Image: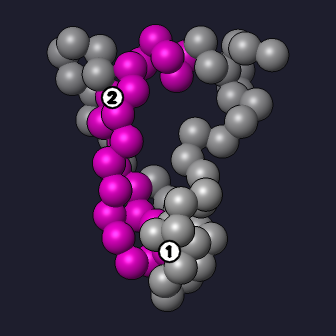
Amino acid sequence: MIARCRHSVLDSKEIYKRTGDVPNVVFCNGAIVEDDDEAKIYYGAADQVVCLATTTVDERVWACYEG
């Protein structure tokens, strides 16, 4: 490991992530990186819903080095 984000990439702050079969849990199911550097992160929340977060690879890399 070269670097690590200080803060979680995924959190359980929204109500739909906090209520369900398994409350207060988010879990990554996979990611796709597009040719334009966009990263699509698919994740589950509270064992009830499937969600999609988008970012760029550069944003995620720089987040690992921020204090």
Judged from the image, the secondary structure of the residue bearing numbered disc 2 is strand
User: Mark 1 belongs to which amino acid?
Assistant: Ala
- Residue in view at x 58 percent, y 39 percent: 9
* Residue 44 placement (x, y as % from top left): 41, 64
Magenta-highlighted residues: 39-61
* Residue 34 placement (x, y as % from top left): 21, 23
Q: Which residue corresponds to mark 2?
A: 39
- The mark nearer the N terminus, 2 or 1, is 2
User: Mark 2 belongs to which amino acid?
Assistant: Ala
**With 35 as the anchor, is 5 left or right in this view?**
right
Q: Looking at the rendering, which quadrant does residue 67 occupy? A: top right
Q: Residue furthest front?
A: 15
**With 50 as the anchor, is 13 left or right in this view?**
right
Q: How many labels does the image show?
A: 2
Q: Is the magenta stretch mostly helix, strand or loop?
A: strand
Q: Is residue 57 magenta?
A: yes
* Residue 23 placement (x, y as % from top left): 59, 78
Please tell me whether residue 51 is drawn above or below residue 56 in the rendered image.
below
Please tell me whether residue 24 is drawn above or below residue 58 in the rendered image.
below
Q: Which residue corresponds to mark 1?
A: 46
Q: Looking at the rendering, which quadrant does residue 57 occupy? A: top left
* Of the two numbered discs 2 and 1 in the rendering, the one whose residue sits closer to the viewer: 1
* Residue 52 placement (x, y as % from top left): 32, 48
